[in-house]
Amino acid sequence: QVQLVESGGGLVQAGGSLRLSCAVSGLTFSNYNIVWFRQAPGKEREFVAAIAALSWNAGLSVYEDFAKGRFTMSRDNAENTVYLQMNDLKPEDTAVYYCAATGSWATWRTSSPPRYGMNYWGKGTLVTVSS
């Protein structure tokens, strides 16, 4: 059974930092690209960042414009875990953050919300940024 479990969300003041984790089990971790999405209240789910499968393009990561320079994604292949380090958080970053796994690259650009072509999803972790 495939599971993606997010953790690390919480309440933080503007300008603060959080590190989200996504623990993955039940699949061959090195073969999957892992993607972070977020969904703010009343808004559509949106792409945040992605990191490539170790077996395909180790080290490749991409970010949505709002995340560039503030968010960093990494993966620990020994622990089957992906991280999203978020710095300089803003109130507009308030959202439920989801991690997802896909065997294909860039489907978040070619597929429609809310699933964006992902194979598996976690249940999300809430990030609240106060002003």
Image (tube, helix red, strand yellow):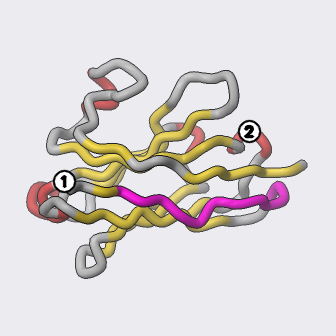
Q: Is residue 42 above or below residue 31?
A: above
Residue lying farthest front? Answer: 1
Q: Residues within 10 Å of mark 2 (few under 14, many from 20)?
A: few
Whether residue 12 is in magenta: the answer is yes
From the top left corner, tell me how far across and down residue 90 is, in percent.
76, 48
Whether residue 112 is in magenta: the answer is no
Q: Residue at x 79, y 44 (%)?
A: 91
Q: Residue at x 33, y 28 (%)?
A: 116
Residue position marked by numbered label 2 in the rendering: 92
Q: Amino acid at mark 2?
A: Glu
Measured Cα–Cα span from mark 2 to mark 1: 29 Å
Q: Earlier in the sequence, mark 2 or mark 1?
A: 1
Q: Secondary structure at mark 2?
A: helix
Q: Residue at x 27, y 36 (%)?
A: 118
Residue lying farthest bottom? Answer: 78
Residue position marked by numbered label 1 in the rendering: 32
Q: Which mark is residue 54?
A: none
> Magenta residues?
4-15
Q: Residue at x 40, y 22 (%)?
A: 113
